[in-house]
Amino acid sequence: MSPEKMDLSHIRCVVFDYGFSLSSGLYFNVSPPGMTDWEERVQRAVFRGNDDTITDPWMRGEIGLVEIAGLLAREIGLDAEEVLWYLRQGCTDLGFNEAVYEFARRVHCSPLKSALVTANMDVFSDVVVPSHGLDDLFDVIVNSADVGTCDKTVLWPLAFNSLGCGISYRDSLLIEDGEKNPAAFRKLGGMAHQYLGEGEFCGWLDGVDFGENGSVAPSSASSQKRV
């Protein structure tokens, strides 16, 4: 006897996280000619291991990619405009986690509403979204850099308000990696699934009952590919 499926038939909205949920592709993947250590240089100059003195203000919109390019240019001895071009170009062709992307596509084609809510930098809104057509895939996109805070408990309600129709936590599902934000979403009254990888996600989808919207999660989810 097959196990009883998780009942999500009341869900009217699916909220997606971006980094390591919808996509695990790394930014800035195009390097200047001959600079084989480009990614390491970017990591050292900008991300600095666990030092958030640059990334946190960047994700709050307090600094932008232009300032980052200037910082990196001084570190590696290139013209800031040239560095800016490569930084932007390196965000135009990013990979997606296929099962999550396909689920997002099916949600978009269903009566359900969808939102992409991310703690991210200005380059996400300016380059990643238009380059990958994400504004055509999601009804609403909320990026921390456009709002001024990385607190998802502030960002999620902004998405709900933009979606309208009285959508709130109680009729929404979150798809996000990590433990903290899914736990917070549940505590606020929503449903959440912690993304742990493609195989696990496909298996989880097979065990979910979306009621009248069951077509968003077919049993063949594991075989779907982005087109």
Image (tube, rainbow, N blue to C red):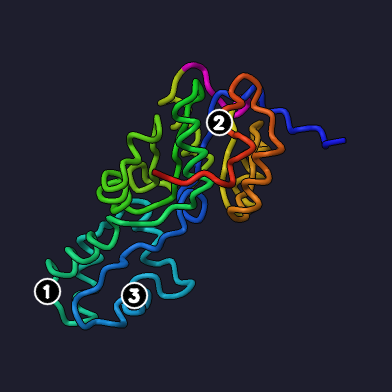
Q: Amino acid at mark 2?
A: Val
Q: Is residue 208 above or below residue 170?
A: below
Q: Position of residue 44 (x, y in %)?
A: 36, 78
Chain part drawn in magenta: 165-171
Q: Is residue 159 above or below residue 86?
A: above
Q: Which residue is mark 2?
A: 216
Q: Kindly identify the residue that appears in the image at 26 percent across and 50 percent down.
A: 127
Q: Position of residue 88 (x, y in %)?
A: 23, 59
Q: Position of residue 40 (x, y in %)?
A: 36, 79
On whether residue 13 falls in the magenta region, the answer is no
Q: Is residue 158 above or below residue 60?
A: above
Quadrant of the image occupied by residue 89? bottom left
The dot on residue 222 is none
Distance from label 2 to label 3 (Cα)? Answer: 37 Å
- In the rendered structure, the answer to whether residue 102 lies left or right of residue 10 reads left
Q: Residues within 10 Å of mark 1 (few under 14, many from 20)?
A: few
Q: 3 or 42, which lies in front?
A: 3
Q: Kindly identify the residue that appears in the image at 31 percent across and 82 percent down.
A: 37
Q: Amino acid at mark 3?
A: Glu
Q: Locate the C terminus by quadrant.
A: top left
Q: Position of residue 202 (x, y in %)?
A: 62, 46
- In the rendered structure, the answer to whether residue 117 lies left or right of residue 189 reads left
